[in-house]
Image (tube, rainbow, N blue to C red):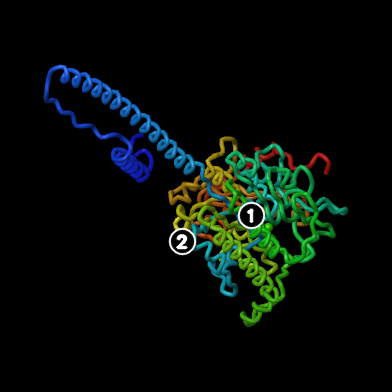
Amino acid sequence: MPRGVLCDRSTEESDMGFALFFEAGNKVGYPARPHINWSGNGGINKQKREKEKDEKKRLHELSKATKHDKTIVMKFFSCLFALAVLAIASSAAEKKPNFLVIMVDDLGYGDLSCYGATDLKSPHIDALFSEGMRFDSFYANCPVCSPTRASFVTGLYPDNAGVPGVIRTPLPERPTSWGNLRNDVVTLPTHLKKAGYDSALIGKWHLGMEKPDRPTDVGFDFFHGFLGDMMDDYYEHLRHGKHYMRKNEEAIHPEGHATDLFTDWTVDYLKERKDKDTPFFLFLAYNAPHTPIQPPEDWLAKVKEREKGIDDKRAGLVALIEHLDYGVGKVVDSLKAEGIWEDTVVIFTSDNGGQSNVGARNLPLNGGKQQMWEGGIRVGTCVTWPGVIEPGSLQKNHISMTMDIYPTLAEIAGVPVDFDMDGRSFLPALKGEKMKNDRPLFWVRLEGNMAYGGLHYHAARIGDWKLLRNTPFEPYQMFNLANDPGEQKPIPRQKAPQKYNELFNSLMNHINLSGRYKWQRENP
Ligand SMILES: [Ca+2]
């Protein structure tokens, strides 16, 4: 076994073990060489010589046997040592970190204390950001829920995943669903299974309420949450009178605020996981702080008491976010209490920006949920990985999107994606390496209410340049985000025609190619 190839310390410890063994062996296990006197002659001497000859022969045989025994013992221990080293190396190679992805719902870019909110306290999420790497230029794949979640699960742009728009509870008056998750793609939990991961989803799904689109149909081993797009009440858990809360496929009727339920179920899951040999991938999808803005009453009272003069609308959202923050804190505490924090990669992100008309703060960005402005799609994101990611590190300008999480986790798990995928691993960035921001990025949303008329609207970004429109009926506008991060000064096409054409043509190419994938169900 060559020295230096494997762990030096193990090798030296084992060599020392051999030396001790043989020293001890010479003292107690093997006969000492006898003293032979060669004086005297004649018959007696002959007899003596014969005897001595026999004795020498015996000793020679004994010596040969001893050498042979030593060789066998040495070989045995060499094998044992090699096996031990192999076992250590193999266990190190096979030891994979757990993954916990916390995706919150509609959290505004500026709605954490660590992102500048002064009327809100988010100590637990802030702590997560400071214990890992913070990404200030991370994008959700869409300014609304389902498409971003489809990108997370498939590693594809929403339209390429079959989910350009929101999937909703059907209503009689007009169509409400604008997507259908493709069933011919390898989902993230299915892919991670190749590396031995057990997968679970706790919380909001929003990618289909029926077979074959439920979490357990697409690769999650365990589901404890709700299938629908939202809840009309955080305590009743219904949507348009329909009940979507499930444990795997079984309908359940738990009592309590949804944020508390998802927190408690996660704590339970982590307790169960701590003694398992296999790693886990847990997707914890809180529905807070999505509407209805319904924090527990004591949390609301606390905010009103503390923030003198805060308006009711803002107070409700602040309390809902602070209650969510408390839940995230309990989950992180549980990871630490169960002794699995050190072996777990945690990602915190949001599925889109904050909803401006319910009091969300997306500053310093423009716009919010549903819009292609930065405030609709840029989301504060962090990744912790003890021992690998430097705590407190910051990626201010590095750009990744929700769909990039899939190939990143796959690479960490040792099963890098080797098939066509829009997402790109940002593992190098996590290791502190510089990655280029040169790929074109696209956003799409299809929607059927009065403002959108059943049509798509898009945005594209290449380098610092961005093209966007916020409904299918307005003209595109172009911005340079390096000079104008708040998107206040549109640059006319005539001023930078080459950039405009590059963005536009690139977007048309994406739209054209994504037309290959249908988003409607066979039997809507
Ligand atoms: Ca959302």
Say which quarter of the image contains residue 366: bottom right
In 3D space, how far apart are the residues under numbered discs 1 and 2 (Cα atoms)?
30 Å
Residue 2 position in % (x across, y down): 34, 35
Residue sitting nearer the eye, 287 or 191: 191
Give the quarter the ligand 1 occupies.
bottom right
Pointer 1: what residue?
A: 272
Q: Residue at x 52, y 60 (%)?
A: 484
Furthest-right residue in this view: 172
Callout 2 environment at 10 Å: few (<14), some (14 to 19), or many (20+)?
some
Residue 491 position in % (x across, y down): 55, 55
Residue sitting nearer the eye, 210 or 145: 210
Judged left or right of residue 325, residue 132 is left
Q: Residue at x 68, y 50 (%)?
A: 147
Furthest-left residue in this view: 40
Question: What secondary structure is marked by label 1?
Answer: helix
Q: Residue at x 56, y 62 (%)?
A: 337
Q: Is there any visible trace of residue 450 in the rendered image?
A: yes
Q: Is there any visible trace of residue 473 in the rendered image?
A: no
Residue 86 position in % (x across, y down): 44, 37
Callout 1 environment at 10 Å: few (<14), some (14 to 19), or many (20+)?
few
What is the three-letter code of the residue carrying label 1?
A: Glu
Residue sitting nearer the eye, 181 or 89: 89
Relative vertical location of residue 215 with respect to residue 295 in this rendering, above or below: above
What is the three-letter code of the residue carrying label 2?
A: Gly
Question: What secondary structure is marked by label 2?
Answer: loop
Pointer 2: what residue?
A: 392
Residue 75 position in % (x across, y down): 38, 31
Q: Are marks 1 and 2 in contact (CB under 8 Å)?
A: no
Say which quarter of the image contains residue 16: top left
Judged left or right of residue 32, residue 436 is right
